Image (spheres, coloured by chain):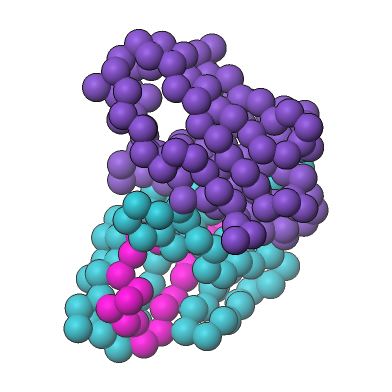
Chain colours: A cyan, B purple
Amino acid sequence: QQQVKQSPQSLIVQKGGISIINCAYENTAFDYFPWYQQFPGKGPALLIAIRPDVSEKKEGRFTISFNKSAKQFSLHIMDSQPGDSATYFCAARSGNTGKLIFGQGTTLQVKP
Amino acid sequence: DTGVSQDPRHKITKRGQNVTFRCDPISEHNRLYWYRQTLGQGPEFLTYFQNEAQLEKSRLLSDRFSAERPKGSFSTLEIQRTEQGDSAMYLCASSLEGVAKEAFFGQGTRLTVV
């Protein structure tokens, strides 16, 4: 019930390509779905987030697509750049406490 | 710098020793969270505070772990009698209370138990 499943575990994309990372959850009580970007040796940094009453949110090259009925959401990185190479985590927030349940992470490598 | 600050950044300790980490949240944030991240995994929730009250503890937080947030400002996480399995990155995050209030993470403390 508390798990968030993320795929793929790793992803290699050519510069300029589209990177797509998928997540699925079970608990319908989650009220907020952020994506975090993490570089080696650093803490996670918020990239973009969405609430379940919205089906899509776009910020620059980053887009979240949200399918409430399927309990799935995905991150799309358009025009991927080598600087996007990092580990990406989806998460789901438990409303009352605000604690985050994270996916297992996706290591993205963008080749120049 | 108004971000979340953690100290130390790295800690190497011998098995059986006690260690303490500190987290200074963003000043106006009333919620503070501790997470643990092992290599290749996502962060896992340990505990959280609202102001000075510790409101939830994960089952991951064994009796050897204790966290405090005196006066609702900085927080400390202490691990007693460290074990090799405690080796991980310990992350602190803070946020305001409320729907869709984003959590900001610190840089983490990397603990290595030898």
Asked if A106 appears above or below A95 in the picture, the reply is: below
* Observer-nearest of A73 and A105: A105
Residue A111 makes an appearance in the image: yes
Q: Is residue B19 above or below residue A29?
A: above
Position of the C terminus of chain B by quadrant: top left
Which of the two residues, A49 or A54, is positioned nearer the viewer here?
A49
- Please give the name of the residue rendered at 31% of the width and 29% of the height, measured from the top-left corner: B12
Residue B56 x/y as whole percent? 68, 28
The quarter of the picture where residue B22 lies is top right
A75 on left or right of A92: left
Q: Is residue B14 in the magenta section?
A: no
Q: Which residues are magenta?
A: A69-88
- Find residue B31 and report its horizontal and vertical position in percent: 72, 43
Residue occupying the point 36% across, 60% down: A39
Whether residue A32 is visible, yes or no, is no
x%, y% of residue B25?
65, 47
Image-quadrant location for residue A52: bottom right
Q: Residue B23's quadrant in the figure?
A: top right
Q: Residue at x 46, y 50 (%)?
A: B107
Residue A80 among magenta residues: yes
* B99 lies left or right of A111: right
Foreground of the two, A3 or B37: B37
